[in-house]
Amino acid sequence: MNPDWGRVLAARDRLVAAARQTGPEADTLCEGWQVHDLVAHLLTLQRDPLSWPGMGLGFLSSLTERRMDAALRNGYSAALGRLAHRPPGIPIFLEDPWRGYGHHLGEYAVHTEDIVRANGLPPTELDPATDDALWRRLLPAAATLLARRGFGLRLRRADGPESTQVLPGEVCVVATGTALELLMLCYRGPHAADVRLTGPKKAAEALWPTRTQ
């Protein structure tokens, strides 16, 4: 098996285990979503192209919500079973198979933490190869998610020598943490990640305008 794909399978399995441990109505870090919403989101990403436009276009969001409801039509247990046993590929990530499945890995990793951290589950432990793969995914994700905020950002691994400038700017924030924590910083903000931020407070507030710590 391709080791990159194997890491995606393992990440999916970690998410399913967390979802089983908490149950469908448990909170997540996705505002307004419970665990059953997150499961439905992943199922529609995998197999329901009709749901995809509404994930990026607000005026179509009601269609996406209806498709997510349809994914849960036979109940949460059946939906979670489908997520657990069918291939975790996400066709909307068209170029990902040629890029080490990094976007797939990041999607499952972040949503696992959305469940784990909202419900006080034991921290996720990752092997070094998965941590390295998340670091590679982190760099383009940070540049995309935090672009046009007007300040620079440098990411530094707490468990390795890597340090990379992902956003240009004379006024710069340096964020230090593991690859997983830095990924959560970029997707969810400082309140959701165990990271150390150094640099001007105004820059951090601009990069993460809500709930900045």
Image (spheres, helix red, strand yellow):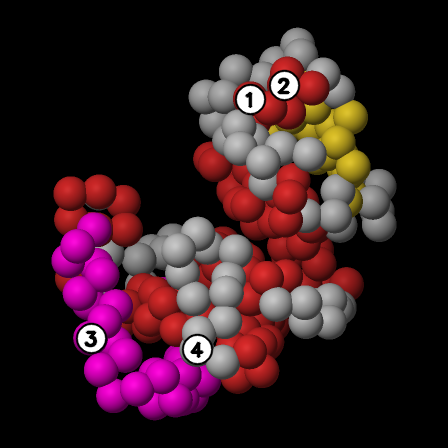
Count of numbered tags = 4
Neighbourhood count class around disc 4 (C-alpha, 10 Å): few under 14, some 14–19, many 20 upward: some
Q: How far is the residue under mark 3 from the one under mark 4?
A: 15 Å
Image quarter of the N terminus: bottom right
Element at label 3 = helix
Q: How far is the residue under mark 2 from the one under mark 3?
A: 42 Å
Decide whether residue 67 is among the magenta residues: yes
Please state which of residues 133 and 114 is positioned toward the viewer in this rendering.
114
Quickly name the residue at label 4.
24
Amino acid type shown at disc 1: Ala
Quickly name the residue at label 1.
206
Residue 72, given in percent of the width and then of the height, sits at 27, 79
Q: Earlier in the sequence, mark 3 or mark 4?
A: 4
Quickly name the residue at label 3.
70
Element at label 2 = helix
Quickly name the residue at label 2.
203
Q: Is residue 211 left or right of residue 66?
A: right
Amino acid type shown at disc 2: Ala
Asked whether residue 144 appears in the rendered view, the answer is: yes
Q: Earlier in the sequence, mark 2 or mark 3?
A: 3
Q: How far is the residue under mark 1 from the one under mark 2?
A: 5 Å
Residue 2, given in percent of the width and then of the height, sits at 55, 74
Q: How far is the residue under mark 3 from the one under mark 1?
A: 38 Å
Q: Is residue 21 left or right of residue 62?
A: right
Q: Which residues are magenta?
A: 61-90
Residue 48, given in percent of the width and then of the height, sits at 22, 68
